[in-house]
Image (spheres, rainbow, N blue to C red):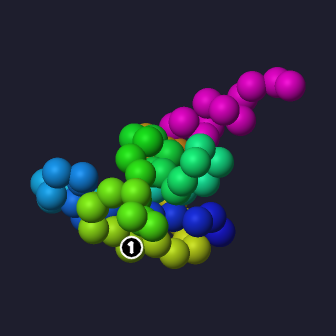
Amino acid sequence: MAHVVKLFTNDYGEKYDNPQWHYVHENCGGAVAFCSGEYFGAGESGCEYKDKEGKITCPDCIALIKTIKTVKL
């Protein structure tokens, strides 16, 4: 399970049509949705969201994670 977030609105109050569960990246000075880089929570933005431990459903986050996993260190 991963820390995931579902964003219902963006910083400008615009609603998302089909909110997905995004992977949360927490190593860039705050919590952000992995694929979009949108900050949420702790006064970082005014977006409406829900976060939990669960399964990633965002196809963009999944594609980025798969790309990163192919990198050989």
- Residue 65 locus on image (x, y percent): 60, 40
Residue found at the far left of this picture: 14
38 sits left or right of 1 in the view: left
Q: Which amino acid does label 1 sit on?
A: Lys
For this view, does 39 lie left or right of residue 29?
left
The secondary structure that dominates the magenta segment is helix
Let me know if residue 17 appears in the view: no
The residue wearing badge 1 is 50
Residue 52 in view of the camera = yes
For image coordinates 15% across by 58% down, the residue present is 13
Position of 24 with respect to 58 (left or right) is: right
Q: Quadrant of the C terminus?
A: top right
Q: Is residue 68 magenta?
A: yes
**Residue range (magenta):** 63-73
Q: How many marks?
A: 1
Instruction: Name which residue lies at 59% across and 44% down.
Output: 28
| Closer to us: 67 or 6 | 6
Q: In this view, does 73 lie above or below 63?
A: above
Q: Where is residue 42 in the image (x, y as percent from the top left)?
A: 45, 67
